[in-house]
Each structure stands twice: as C-alpha cells, then as structure tokens.
Image (tube, rainbow, N blue to C red):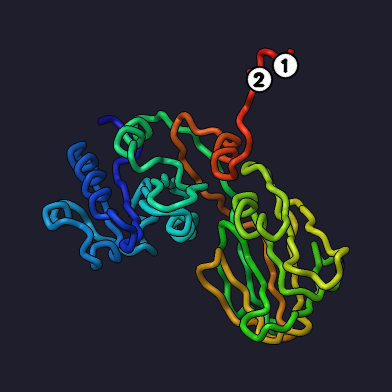
C-alpha cells in the first residue's frame, strides 16, 4: 500500500466490550500492509492485544505517541477520542476515530466497516477537518499554577458543596458581567454538541472560529449564552469559590479558590481530524440528534 502515513499509532479504551476482537482485526490489516504500528502502553498492559500481534508492534506511551507516529487511530467512543486528541494536538498529527462507543460525534468510522474505511483513508480518500482547542491557565496570586488543554470545553462548576459560585467574566480585559450560578461552560464548536448543548447553548458549525460561554443554572434569567471570536482571551475571576472546580473535557479537573483567575484562549495548534470520504457534518447532526429527514429533494425546491 502506498500511503502518506507509514507510522500508525493505536489508542483504545481497554474496558470497551469486544475491543480485543476489533483491535486484532485492525492490527491484522495494518501489519499485513507492512506498516509500522505503535500500541499505547495501557492497551498492552491490559492484555487486550494478542501475543502474536504484540510481538510485531511497538509499545509507546500516550504522551509520546504524537511524537513517534504520523497518524493515530482511536478505537473507542468520543471520550477516548478526546483523551487522545489532547496528546496529539501539540504534534499536529491527524486522528481517525473508530466508533466503539455510543454517540460517536467524533468517532466517525463505523466499527462494522472499519477495515474497508481505513484502507480507503490510508490511500488518501478522506475528508480533512481542523478543530480548535482551548488552553486554560489557572492564575493564583499572580502566578500560573496549572495549565490544561480541552477539545470540547472548560467548565467551572460548583463542586460538591451544592452552593452557587460567584465570578466575574472579562473578554480581552473588558468587563462583561458578574454571575451567580452553578457554573459556566466555555465551549469550542466541537463541544457545542456536548455539555454546552444540554445547558441550552447553541450548536456551532465545526469549522467556525468561535467559542460559546454558556451559564449553568444562572440565578438571573437574563444571563444567556454568548458567542465570541476565538481570537478573544477570556478571564474568569472567581469571587466566591465555595467548593468550585475547573473541569477539562470532563476528564480532569483542578480545585479553584476565591481570587483565582481562569484564563482561557485558543490553543496555538488546531487538531487535524480525518473523516471517511462520505462524511457530512449536517448528516451527522441529523443522525445523532434524531432530526427529521429530508422529504423533498433539493432539486424540487427551485
């Protein structure tokens, strides 16, 4: 096979049912094509890789997979994809998602057609998409005490105490509002179909260069979601933290104190995502959100 991707990394969620069989099928295809294959260490340690397959692959950590590979294939659901995306984004290598989960907004290759679709994509038959990420710095007493990336969203929430939190929001250092609520979601277009949508935020087309700020149960009903350019820098000053936390893609978090500032901006690199040639964004929305199907062909609208 002639392909632009000669070193392929595979990331899985070992706890997914039947993942071992899917992984064996994928490895059989890739190794038969004499490609260099890298398996993430977690998958190898969990014993889901057959010994004869493992002997023909290399093992790498997720932190290094972007450095060692020219393409990463993710076997799992959207959560597995999010985790891999944050590791791959700094290295600008593309990701392909194979859906082994439930919703599958990000993992667009169906598991039942995995080998056929990936074979076509490796020979250049794919649709390329750039997705923006968020970079968040936690500022405490004038110093940065932590940084994280997020492909979906950065969420400030009230934590386990059950009390509302209070914060002030600034965009490009301009004061926007003071809010008392259960929290705030700062979402990318990718994350606009996740938590932000459930909280009443708008759906942003994936290619838009924008963020949304979506309040979570605000005390004032006039606090509504707003969309801002992705060139903006967002500062959230916590004035009453309680047990507040900042969550990143719902997979990691850090505790927040009163007086902390969470500074959020677009990450300098975007994520490269490869979809099957037949991928269409609005078709995905229709299928995943159960919208109505088209009744009249577009040619009859004229």
Q: Which of 141 and 96 is in front in this view?
A: 96
Residue 180 on image: x %, y %: 81, 76
Rendered-image quadrant of the N terminus: top left
| Local secondary structure at mark 1 | loop
Q: How many labels does the image show?
A: 2
The residue to which callout 1 is attached is 301
Note whether 193 is above or below 248 in the view shown: above
Q: From the viewer's perspective, is residue 242 above or below residue 213? A: below
Say whether residue 165 is left or right of residue 71: right
The spot of residue 230 in percent (x, y) is: 71, 52
Observer able to see residue 298: yes
Whether pointer 1 and pointer 2 mark residues with C-beta atoms closer than 8 Å, the reply is yes
Q: Is residue 176 left or right of residue 245?
A: right
Locate residue 102 relative to residue 153 in the image: left or right.
left
Front-most of 293 and 261?
A: 293
Q: Mark 2 points at which residue?
A: 296
Tell me the residue at 75%/65% (across/down). Answer: 215
Q: How far apart are marks 1 and 2 (CA)?
A: 8 Å
Residue 231: give its label. none
Q: Quadrant of the C terminus?
A: top right
């Amino acid at each position: 096979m002639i392909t632009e991707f000669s070193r392929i990394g595979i990331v899985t969620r070992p706890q997914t049912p039947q993942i071992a069989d899917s992984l064996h099928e994928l490895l059989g295809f890739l190794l038969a094509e004499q490609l260099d294959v890298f398996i993430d260490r977690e998958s190898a340690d969990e014993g889901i890789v057959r010994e004869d397959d493992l002997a023909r692959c290399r093992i790498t950590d997720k932190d290094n997979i972007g450095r060692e590979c020219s393409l990463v294939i993710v076997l799992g659901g959207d959560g597995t994809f999010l985790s891999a995306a944050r590791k791959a984004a700094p290295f600008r290598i593309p990701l392909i998602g194979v859906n082994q989960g439930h919703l599958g907004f990000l993992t667009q290759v169906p598991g039942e057609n995995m080998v056929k679709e990936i074979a076509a994509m490796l020979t250049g038959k794919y649709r390329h998409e750039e997705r923006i990420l968020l970079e968040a710095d936690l500022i405490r007493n004038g110093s940065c005490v932590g940084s994280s990336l997020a492909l979906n969203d950065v969420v400030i929430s009230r934590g386990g105490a059950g009390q509302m939190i209070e914060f002030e929001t600034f965009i490009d250092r301009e004061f926007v509002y003071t809010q008392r609520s259960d929290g705030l979601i700062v979402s990318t277009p990718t994350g606009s179909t996740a938590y932000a949508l459930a909280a009443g935020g708008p759906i942003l087309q994936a290619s838009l260069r924008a963020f949304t700020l979506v309040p979570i149960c605000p005390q004032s009903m006039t606090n509504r979601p707003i969309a801002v350019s992705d060139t903006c820098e967002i500062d959230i000053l916590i004035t009453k933290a309680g047990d507040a936390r900042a969550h990143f893609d719902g997979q990691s978090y850090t505790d927040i104190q009163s007086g902390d500032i969470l500074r959020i901006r677009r990450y300098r690199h975007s994520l490269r995502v490869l979809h099957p040639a037949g991928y269409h964004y609005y078709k995905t929305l229709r299928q995943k959100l159960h919208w109505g199907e088209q009744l009249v062909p577009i040619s009859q609208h004229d």
